[in-house]
Image: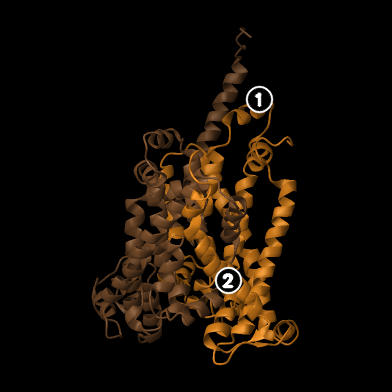
Amino acid sequence: MTAMPQISADTLANMEKQRRRTRISSAFRYSLLIIVGLIMVYPLIWMFGASFKTNAEIFSSPSFWPKEPTVQGYIDGWKTSTPYTFAKFFMNSMMIIIPKMIGTAISCTLVAYGFARFDFPFKKIIFSTVIATLLLPNVVTRIPQYLLFRDIGWLDSFLPLWVPSALAGDAFFVFMLIQFLRAIPRDMEEAARVDGANTLQTLIYIVVPMLTPALISVCLFQFMWTMNDFLGPLIYLSSVENYPISLALKLSIDTTEAFAWNQILAMSCLALAPSLIVFFMAQKYFIEGISTGGVKG
Amino acid sequence: MGGDSKYLGLWYVAPYVIGLLLFTAFPFIASFYLSFTDYDLLSKPEWTGLDNYQKLFTRDRTFDKSLKVTLVYVFMTVPLKLAFALFIAVILNYRLRAIGLFRTAFYVPSILGGSIAIAVLWRYIFADTGLVNMMLEGIGLEGVNWFGDPENALFTISLLRCWQFGSAMVIFLAALQSVDKSLYEAASIDGANKWQLFRYITLPLITPVIFFNLIMQTVQAFQEFNGPYIITEGGPLKSTYLLPLYIYDKAFKSFDMGYASAIAWVLFVIIMVLTLIAFWSSKKWVYYAGDKRS
């Protein structure tokens, strides 16, 4: 196959036509993406702008720009109608999230390491339960879980929110870490074993450093999901002093007088802030995590 | 790792096994048992046989309504969301500039969408004089009664889910980017047009992620709670009263644990049956690389 194909004037004209068509369709694509992108993001921008508006203005103009900017919504909203300020609810959210995140990272690493690097009796069966729990709807286990936590006296504490995750209860993360581990070559680990390290040392000094990007993804997803979790706290926490942000927001909708829209919007903006900040700081881990493991959400 | 005891691996997975037994396996069986009982938390569960299920299927109008609403919601939301996610992923997959910027803009709603704050926002932008109606009126259209009208309320809730198409889109995009470009070139030489390239090359090659997204999104949609609970509280006229809301009310408002478990099991069986159908049918339409079929 050494002969070059002949290029006729005809083909050249065709190529020109082709190029013009590509240009038009790429202009079309960009405009479509920009319109869709605006529709996606505008509600958030509007929300942020509206949180600085007066109550009268919120429902009078579709523009996000406040005419007479005021931080009254933030000041009033922060006080809340409870004996606590919003600071307390932020603290509670962090008190739920941070131990849960650490517990998840440690337990899921141990379990994923066990599955990815060892053979043991019943491994197949146990691993198949990981996949099964991945698909098992929580709705079917929620009531007995509640009864269990009630019987051991954990209601109205953070324990029901921490403990299942600290026992690698989020099968999705276990699965994601196993996928990561399978892709990492074992040479380094084997070398460490030859040098006399035991399996736990190998895990801590060799595997964990290589697993760090995946672990960051796990922590970030756990952060977001726990931040968004509403049903868990709703069922398990009953006293206001334990409320995380999600419950506090629901409470403020129920108790704030009907026309204090700007307070509610202001507190909603604050409630979204931690997730947004974390997302923009660590975007690439989200996209990587989601593309390797596939994700709910 | 040769010299280790064959039980060593079990130690590493032990936390998972304990958690599985305590928080998944035991509750799973217990909830099946409870669904055959009458249990109000005050006295011991009392065995009532099939009474709960009988009542559900013959005398409970709320259940009928709730089941219907749930099915409509799932079959409306999941295809809409996935089709949109795939459509945008295909467009993003052309070598465009600023792909990262667009991907971020489309993905942010998925990160935030499940939160209560967004549900609150939804209440405001779809209110009678809210953002959406103000915009519609601005371009000369008539405002829509998004939540007040039982005909529209479910759709408005569904839109909140569709708005979160980003995570499905990112998965689609990753799959699209891994499609071997030489296949397109070969087919183009044979004279295939763009639609044919998509229909006969792209689509078959990404069926595994379509399948994955379909299952995950369906299982989730059946369990939607936050949106309808915050935005419409199940109303108007129970038009957004999804089964998870009904289960919650029965279990944690009227403390009818037995009956609530029965509803949960009906929901579970529906999800399982649909998942099994999907797995069974996947042999016919999902393509796996290395497979002999073409």
In the image, what residue occupies the spot 76% across and 85% down? B58
Q: Tag on residue B219?
A: none
According to the rendering, which colour does chain B have? Answer: orange
Q: Tag on residue B26?
A: 2
Query: Is residue A248 shown left or right of residue A67?
Result: right
* Residue A44, picture quadrant: bottom left
- Residue type, mark 1 in image: Ile
Q: Is residue B65 above or below residue A98?
A: below
* Residue A158, picture quadrant: bottom left
Q: Position of residue A136 (x, y in %)?
A: 60, 64
Q: Is residue B281 above or below residue B189?
A: below
Question: In the picture, which quadrant includes the N terminus of chain A?
Answer: top right
Q: Is disc 2 in contact with disc 1, using a CB cutoff of under 8 Å?
A: no
Q: Where is residue A133 in the image (x, y as percent from the top left)?
A: 57, 61
Q: Name the residue under label 1.
A: B189
Query: Is residue A178 shown left or right of residue B243?
Result: left
In the rendered image, what is the letter of the chain coloured brown? A
